[in-house]
Image (cartoon, rainbow, N blue to C red):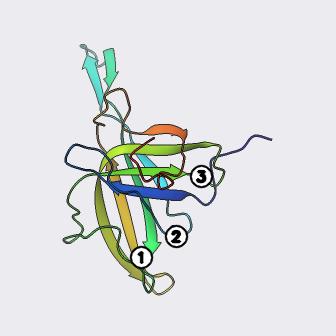
């Protein structure tokens, strides 16, 4: 039976230095059930029309990605970063390891983090974080890499 990259993920986040390198990786508290997702936005479609409305050529722009998750505002739990009405300064890196550590996870080397607090009687206060992937500093990598993730806090370095 093949292993699948689903289930309870582990997520780590690190603020990036001025040089674009991760500083200190921090493990995110376990997210709220079914809140963790990578949301792709399909790139714009460019069409070269000819008379009659047919396409002579079609070109797509690149997709963009946002990884989002929510955590509960529990007693003793601090926010991942300070915000000003949802705006978080600086850039961040993120790694997500699925429940099975031997299957493909997600690495975003550079992104912008935002924050959305909410409340329901069922869940209490939730802190939703969204990391919008940016072009990585390392031009050999993509904005979202699908790879096996190792715990970056094990050595607390900026390694893959």
In the rendering, at what x and y percent does residue 118 appear?
Answer: 36, 77
Badge 3 is on which residue?
98
In the rendering, at what x and y percent does residue 68 appear?
Answer: 41, 58
**At 38% across and 46% down in the image, what residue appears?**
158
For disc 3, the neighbor class at 10 Å (few under 14, some 14 to 19, many from 20) is: many
**Helix, strand or loop for disc 3:** loop
> Which of the two labelled residues, at mark 2 and mark 1, occupies the earlier sequence position?
2
- Separation of disc 1 and disc 3 at Cα? 22 Å
For disc 2, the neighbor class at 10 Å (few under 14, some 14 to 19, many from 20) is: some
Q: Check the image and report above or below for 82 versus 101.
A: below
**At 43% across and 49% down in the image, what residue appears?**
39
Q: What is the total number of numbered labels drawn onto the structure image?
A: 3
Task: State which quadrant residue 20 falls in.
Answer: top left
**Helix, strand or loop for disc 2:** loop
**Helix, strand or loop for disc 1:** strand
91 displayed left or right of 121: left
> Which of the two labelled residues, at mark 1 and mark 3, occupies the earlier sequence position?
3
Q: Quadrant of the N terminus?
A: top right
For disc 1, the neighbor class at 10 Å (few under 14, some 14 to 19, many from 20) is: some
Badge 1 is on which residue?
126
From the viewer's side, name the closer residue of 84 and 50.
84
From the viewer's side, name the closer residue of 81 and 44.
81
Q: Check the image and report above or below for 4 versus 25.
A: above
The residue mark sitting in front, 1 or 3, is: 3
Q: Check the image and report above or below for 11 versus 61.
A: below
From the viewer's side, name the closer residue of 101 and 55.
101
| Residue located farthest toward the right when viewing the structure as drawn | 1
């Amino acid at each position: 039976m093949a292993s699948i990259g689903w289930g309870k993920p582990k997520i780590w986040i690190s603020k990036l230095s001025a040089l674009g390198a991760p500083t200190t990786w921090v493990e995110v508290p376990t997210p709220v059930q079914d809140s963790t997702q990578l949301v792709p936005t399909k790139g714009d479609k460019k069409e070269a029309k000819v008379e009659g409305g047919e396409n002579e050529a079609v070109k797509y722009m690149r997709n963009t990605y946002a990884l989002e998750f929510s955590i509960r505002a529990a007693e003793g739990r601090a926010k991942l970063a300070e915000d000003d009405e949802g705006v978080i300064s600086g850039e961040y890196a993120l790694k997500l390891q699925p429940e099975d550590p031997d299957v493909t996870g997600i690495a975003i080397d550079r992104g912008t983090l935002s924050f959305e607090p909410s409340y329901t009687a069922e869940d209490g206060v939730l802190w939703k974080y969204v990391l919008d992937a940016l072009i990585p500093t390392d031009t050999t990598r993509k904005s979202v890499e699908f790879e096996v993730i190792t715990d970056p806090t094990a050595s607390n370095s900026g390694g893959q």
